[in-house]
Image (spheres, helix red, strand yellow):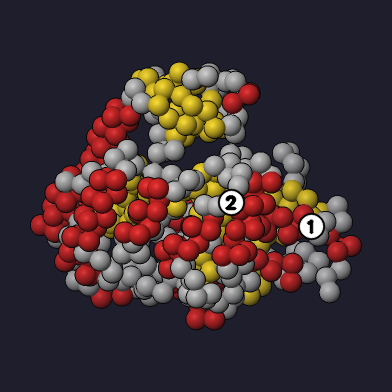
Amino acid sequence: MIDNTIFENKKAAYFTLGCKLNFAETSSIGKMLSENGIRKARQGEIADLCVINTCSVTDLADKKCRQAIRRISRQNPGSFVVVTGCYAQLKPEEIAAIPEVDLVIGAQEKLNILDYIGDMHKRESGDGKVVTSKFKDIRSFQSSCSSGDRTRYFLKVQDGCDYFCSYCTIPMARGRSRNGSITDIVAQAADVARQGGKEIVLTGVNIGDFGKTTGETFIDLIKALDCVEGIERYRISSIEPELLTDEIIKFVASSKRFVPHFHIPLQSGSDEVLKLMKRHYDTSLFRHKIEMIKSIMPDCFIGVDVIVGVRGETDELFNETLEFIQSLDISQLHVFTYSERPGTMALKIDHNVDPKEKHRRSQAILEISEKKLNNFYKSQIGKISNVIFENPAKGKPMHGFTDNYIRVETAYDSSLVNISTKVKLTEYNEKKDSLLCNIID
């Protein structure tokens, strides 16, 4: 039994790096602490407790985490510093050695933070306590949902991954694939609707693998969620191409609430590189998915992940990726430069790409992305769409997104916030990062 009286009048500050899943989990940690008497520190207040939820997808992510730990500690002198997340799971001793850190907790323990913070007594410098489980033992699933300052909610439906791609440490950082039950997730979606939420993004590490621990399937989940009254939109976050079944694509096209927007990791447009990566599909399957989506949802927004400069990616193989990407009817590319991660199988592959060449390849893909995004936006000018506008910063215009993920700008009108509004898309704004619109009564 936790003695909540030790937390009276305590204040917590939170900092999150990385994916939307991390943000959802930080939100759940904050809610748990709040329910036990630790309120969120207001602007200008010094927190008693700092919780830093980390990412470790690249060396740069690790560096940003270390910088964040030191910066937040300076901003909150004397605070009890807890570090969790993927970096904490993968390199706990490295983090514990940082003088400012008091406690490091892993993936299995993060949503049980109250069991480990004790009386938040500051430790000796560089003597942080470590509480982590081996990745093979990370099997519990704890639901999370966050809204942040936007109108979209991020709902965690799945965690972990069983794939072990050659370049990736996520299975070691997140554990085995596991998920919540459809019944529980539907109840959470209904709760979002009661709170006034209109849009939910389904998040996870490998959401198409949903059902490993409950004997259910992802298509069953989205069919059940489609029936929740009050939610106007669902977006599916990144889903593996081989798990994006034709049945799922057809259902999204005909559903009441799932929008025409997909995010699908390609990683490479070379079949040889895909084999080196130990991916579970080839370019032929990927092309089929894109062509099927566009054949039944021609205005669908399709975002695609690409990794450049992996071991084994020769100039010739990279050119295959360029040609393949250029041939696809997609909307935007998210480009990642390969970063060597300890413990991965990729380290055994010959041919390491020079850093300058990695940068050149990244820029080449980004140029293609810019052209494709510009063409997609131009194709939507003159069309009628529904937009859910968000509260803007003071003195700024309002922004929101259409069903098919076009960023839209209009003059501030408080009556439009978090309301599905019919608009006609007209032209680019001055910054060329949004389309302007006319409101249709």
Q: Which mark is residue 176?
A: none
Residue appearing at x 55%, y 77% in the figure: 139
Q: Which mark is residue 35?
A: 1
Q: Secondary structure at mark 2?
A: loop
Q: Is residue 370 left or right of residue 50?
A: left
Q: Nearer the viewer, residue 254 or 315?
A: 254
Q: Residues within 10 Å of mark 2 (few under 14, many from 20)?
A: some
Residue appearing at x 28%, y 58% in the figure: 267
Residue appearing at x 83%, y 70% in the figure: 2
Contact between labelled residues 1 and 2, with CB atoms less than 8 Å apart: no
Instruction: Tally the marks.
Output: 2
Q: Secondary structure at mark 1?
A: helix
Please tell me whether mark 2 or mark 1 is closer to you in this view. 2
Q: Position of residue 197 (x, y in %)?
A: 62, 43
The answer to whether residue 409 of the structure is visible from this angle is no
The disc labelled 1 sits on which kind of residue? Answer: Glu
The answer to whether residue 276 of the structure is visible from this angle is yes
Q: Nearer the viewer, residue 116 or 126?
A: 116
Residue appearing at x 54%, y 55% in the figure: 225
Q: Which mark is residue 228?
A: 2
Q: Position of residue 430 (x, y in %)?
A: 39, 19
Q: Nearer the viewer, residue 430 or 281?
A: 281
Question: Is 129 above or below relative to 325?
Answer: below
Which residue lies most toward the left here? Answer: 316
Of marks 2 and 1, which one's residue comes earlier in the chain?
A: 1
The disc labelled 2 sits on which kind of residue? Answer: Val
Cα separation, mark 2 vs mark 1, equals 27 Å
Which quarter of the picture shows residue 289? bottom left
Q: Position of residue 353 (x, y in %)?
A: 21, 60
Q: Position of residue 49 (x, y in %)?
A: 73, 56
Question: Is 101 above or below relative to 137?
Answer: above
